Image (cartoon, helix red, strand yellow):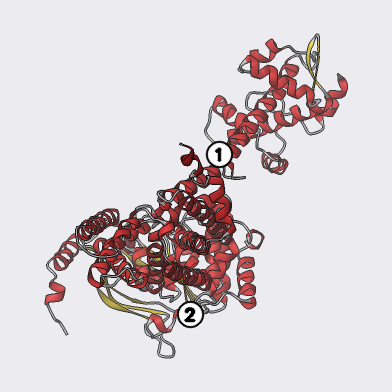
Amino acid sequence: MEDFILLNPPSTWDLLIEFWQFNDMNALWVLMGSILLGTSASVIGSFAFLRRRSLIGDALAHAALPGVMMAFLLFQTRDPLIMFLGAVTSSFIGFFIIDWLPKNTKTKPDAALAITLSFFFALGLMLLSFIQGMEVENKSGLDKILFGQAAAMTQEDINLLMVVTVFILITVMLFFQKFRLIAFNSSYAQSLGIAVNRYELLLALLIVMSVVVGLQLVGVVLMAAVLLTPVAAARFWSDKLTSILILAGILGAISAIISTQISYLAPAMPTGPWMVVSLASLFFLSLLFAPNKGLINRYLQQNQLRQKVAEENILRTLYKLWERTEFQKNDFNMGDIQSLRTMPTHHLQSSLKKLCRRKLLTSSSRGFRLTDSGLEQATLLTRRHRLWENYLNEHLELTPDQVHSQAERIEHILTAEQEKQLEEELKNSQQDPHGNVIPGVNNATQTGAKR
Amino acid sequence: MSNATRPAPIKVQNLNMRYHHKPVLTDVSFEIPEGKTIAIVGPNGAGKSTLLKGIMGLEPLIEGEVSFFGEPLSQKRLSTAYVPQREEIDWDFPISVMDVVLMGRHGQLKLWQRPGKIDHEIAEQALKDLQMWDFRDRQISQLSGGQQQRVFLARALAQQAQLYLMDEPFAGVDVATEKAIIELFKNLKAQGKTIVCVHHDLNTVGEYFDWIIFINARLVAAGPVEEVLTKENLQKAYGGRLSLLNDLTEEVYRTRLNQAHDSD
């Protein structure tokens, strides 16, 4: 038993430190290769995403499988370049089938994609099991391209990976303007005399290339996620294409670092699933926390708006109550407010408290009373509400009730400028369709002084 | 009709187009004058947009020829600007107004070339002409329908072409945009440029355009507004298709007779 303790394997922590000390040169190369792959696949995948051809990467990756197997069968070698060429060839055959079928037969594009994808994948799996039954050298790592295995990559694999990914990134930089133009509006690009077909072929080639060099890292099955998830996540953060591409590249690189490391710490673990899981986590983080389009921000904004509407409604209700007493009585309790405005009691209480804190209301034993600034705002809201009612009444065939419920919403968003516009258009209308006086701009201070 | 001194901006001869086996346009031939505003008018499904796309080579012709100033389009690309329908575009695409307008300069830029200073100046002027300069940094997703249309027109303007082909520029735009487009037409005409528009509104066609091409799967009439905007032509264009012509042309396509019968 004592011997057993002595032979205790190094802890995860030790492995982690060892990895980042880069004593193992191979680890460093694999890390750099995977960062480049994550970056280039995310960037080129962005264009597929923007052209709404998201699934093409998935089909092309699956279509590469029989090419790899055929190349191995024909040449009996694992030379990366031969594998690469085999994969590119069969991916491209897949691409042309996907392109040709819908144009020349009644098969729709989505069906063409699904049929090609599954057919090539099945073909690849058949060849793989055939090879595994054969008595040949070198066959052991072939099945790794299904899910990717960073730790199994050789120096030659990585050299090829680096050349190809750098080529992809440079090409995208060079042709960025044209790629964007075609992704945005390809018929217009064609009308300018740009050879759209040639650029589309170039884009397809770049996608095929990044898919194929990614096979050993990510694997056939999950490659599509690396093309698409980064850009989908980056879309939450920006509306500018260059920023989106850069961010997508960074997200791809981060997920590559995470997954490569895990592949080293736990060699039995395939890299692909880890890469996709870390990308998906980044996607969910973006979905939740992105500053403008994130769900949390949207929820907060919605809440803020709801609160604003509730408070403004209370102000306006107080104005109406005050108006009903011919501007004599100023203090009203919650019961008075609820008689005019349906609102849950606890919400009413909390909103009243907030209004008091903002010094728009004061509360005393007699009830709530509008302060001068509260009155000013309440008058403004009432004015906008009634102006809008008049406007609708004049231009649309609506009953006074319909007009009222419309104005209930519009009053909260009308700006001073629009108010002026309404005023000019309506000339000097004094009363709303229900016969209530529209308070003037200066009315508030005048009547306020009378209190 | 033909002008001896200078060939017509667009001459269409015997144009035939189809969708699967259905004939969309049959034997359309016309020639348009230079420096005029010309409307392509007809009922829904008459093939107005298809005609424009066929002329621009964006959709295949079964038969027929189109020449621009007497030459094939490839020789006259820089003189010709096309404004697609607004609906063709994903307006959520991450791009700013200025970048869209700069796309108009790409016909002149080679391969990886980026728009330069002069291109920016031209785009600036185009945006100003359409009162969209203040919106130059906006994302296109934040524009109203009319503003989107003006961005498209500014992009075409940035091409500095002689001939403008527009697909329904007046569809679904606000009054301000409509006025801006009319103003644009006036300016372009004053410079001797030719404008061809697909137009759907019969009430305004006589007011906005000098010339009309009536189509309904075939050419009904083409000529100056005062001559062709007649009750008779309207009836012909809007009174339904010639069913016999339609059915037999479809039959020709279905049996591939047009390929079997070598006429020349």
In the picture as drawn, the residue positioned furthest to the top comes out as: A365
Name the residue beneath numbered marker 2: B79
Q: Position of residue A4 (x, y in %)?
A: 46, 40
- Residue at the image position 62 percent from the left and 35 percent from the top: A300
Q: Answer left or right for B154 relative to A46.
A: right
In the depicted structure, whether residue A220 falls above or below residue B74: above
**Residue labelled with disc 1:** A295
Q: Give the residue type that dot 1 points to.
A: Leu
Image coords of residue B191 (percent x, y) = 56, 78
Residue A225 against residue B130 in the figure, above or below = above
Asked if the residue at tag 2 contacts the one at tag 1, i.e. Cβ–Cβ closer than 8 Å, the answer is no
Q: Of helix, strand and loop, which one carries label 1?
A: helix
Task: Name the subunit of mark 2.
Answer: B
Q: Is B228 drawn above or below residue A257 in the view shown?
A: below
Q: Residues within 10 Å of mark 2 (few under 14, many from 20)?
A: some
Three-letter code, disc 2: Ser
Mark whose residue sits in front, 1 or 2: 1
Q: Give the percent coordinates (x, y) of residue A313.
A: 67, 25
In the rendered view, tell whether residue A149 sits above or below residue B185: above
State the residue at coordinates (42%, 65%).
A154
Separation of marks 1 and 2 at Cα, in angstroms: 48 Å
